[in-house]
Image (cartoon, rainbow, N blue to C red):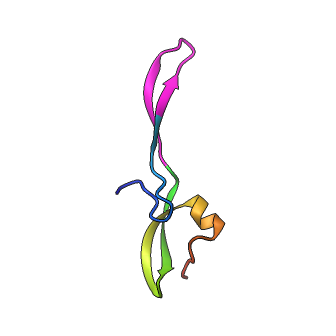
């Protein structure tokens, strides 16, 4: 469950770095997750949410 957005389910993506000499090494792109206090079903919870969900308004932040 680590490195996963609790709203949309976005997680790490795997790929390869390719150098100028065409050597390939493994690479992982992690989502930009933030710990946010959010209102969920009337109660306040801490969630790990990606910044895309925060900007789009899928999360109602609590002060």
Q: Give the residue furthest to the left.
A: 1
Q: Give the residue furthest to the bottom.
A: 42
| Residue plotted at (54% across, 81% down) | 62
| Residue plotted at (56% across, 77% down) | 61
| Residue plotted at (53% across, 19% down) | 19
60 relative to 23, above or below: below
Q: Main secondary structure of the magenta part?
A: strand
Give the position of the N terminus as an image quadrant: bottom left
Q: Is residue 24 within the magenta segment?
A: yes
| Residue plotted at (48% across, 15% down) | 23
Q: Looking at the picture, how far across and down is residue 6, in whole percent?
A: 44, 64
As drawn, is 12 to the left or to the right of 50? left
Q: Is residue 14 within the magenta segment?
A: no
Give the position of the C terminus as an image quadrant: bottom right
Q: Give the residue furthest to the right.
A: 56
Total numbered circles:
0
Q: Looking at the picture, how far across and down is residue 34, in whole percent?
A: 50, 62
12 relative to 39, above or below: above
Q: Looking at the picture, how far across and down is residue 60, in whole percent?
A: 57, 77
Q: Looking at the picture, how far across and down is residue 41, in whole percent?
A: 46, 84
As drawn, is 47 to the left or to the right of 1? right
Residue extent of the magenta highlight: 15-30
Q: Give the residue furthest to the top.
A: 21
């Amino acid at each position: 469950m680590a490195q996963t957005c609790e709203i949309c389910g976005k997680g790490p993506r795997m790929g390869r770095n390719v150098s100028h000499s065409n050597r390939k090494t493994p690479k992982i792109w992690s989502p930009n997750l933030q710990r946010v206090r959010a209102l969920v079903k009337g109660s306040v919870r801490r969630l790990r949410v990606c910044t895309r969900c925060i900007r789009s308004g899928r999360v109602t932040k609590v002060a």
